[in-house]
Image (cartoon, rainbow, N blue to C red):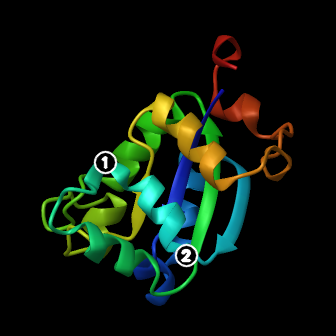
Amino acid sequence: MEKTLVILKPSCVQRALIGEVISRFEKKGLRLAGMKMVQLTDAILSEHYSHLKDRPFFQRVKDSMQVCPVILQCWEGRNATKVVRSLIGVTNGREAAPGTIRGDFSVSSQENIVHASDSSESAKTELKRFFNDNEIFDYKQSTLANLYAGDEI
């Protein structure tokens, strides 16, 4: 099973949407493997968003992510990264389809409720950035046989 990173951004925390967003992932059948609340630092955000460092909105993104603590999560499932990306919708909430997290809860390209890894490779890197090995748990989910066919487990 694949693991992927989800960050519930300050816009999610401030609007009290944490439970609503988590329930979307749970209802889809993903398994929560790790979760913690942290206040992100400028240093870790500079590393995480290094691909944006030359963009004019780089500092604005970092400032937005430091408004309050965020919720870091590790979700697991078959093709978890792709599944999460389809659940959250496109980056700009104004363009995200209704029924997606961003489509239902966001009207912004920045204050868009959630960050999610964009590939299985970046998920591995991002999970190492935000979680220690002992903070991600492996346990048998009792509903697994009801979520996947036998040959998908």
Against 86, residue 130 (above or below) is: below
Percent across and percent down for residue 97 are 20, 56
Dot 1 corresponds to which residue?
51
SS under mark 2: helix
Q: Residue at x 56, y 73 (%)?
A: 40
N-terminal label among 1 and 2: 2
On the question of residue 30 being in view, the answer is no
Circle 2 packing at 10 Å, graded few (<14), some (14-19), many (20+), is some
Foreground of the two, 129 or 10: 129
- Of residues 148 and 123, the one drawn nearer to the viewer in this rendering: 123
How far separated are the C-alphas under marks 1 and 2? Answer: 27 Å
Give the total of numbered labels.
Answer: 2
- Give me the residue at 61% from left, 62% from top: 72
Residue drawn at x 57%, y 63% is 23
Which quadrant would residue 143 be assigned to in this image?
top right
Q: Residue at x 63, y 17 (%)?
A: 152
Residue 46 is left or right of residue 134, and the answer is left
Viewer-side residue, 58 vs 98: 58
* Residue on which the image places disc 2: 18
Residue 56 horizontal/vertical position (percent): 15, 67
| 21 sits left or right of 129 in the view | left
Q: Is residue 145 visible?
A: yes
Q: Amino acid at mark 1?
A: His
The x, y position of residue 20, in whole percent, is 51, 72
Q: Quadrant of residue 76?
A: top right
Q: Is residue 4 above or below residue 50?
A: above
* Quarter of the image that includes the C terminus: top right
Q: Position of residue 142 (x, y in %)?
A: 83, 40
User: Taking 88 as reference, is 76 above or below it?
Assistant: above
Q: Residue 93 shows which numbered tag?
A: none
Name the image quarter holding the N terminus: top right
**SS state under label 1:** helix
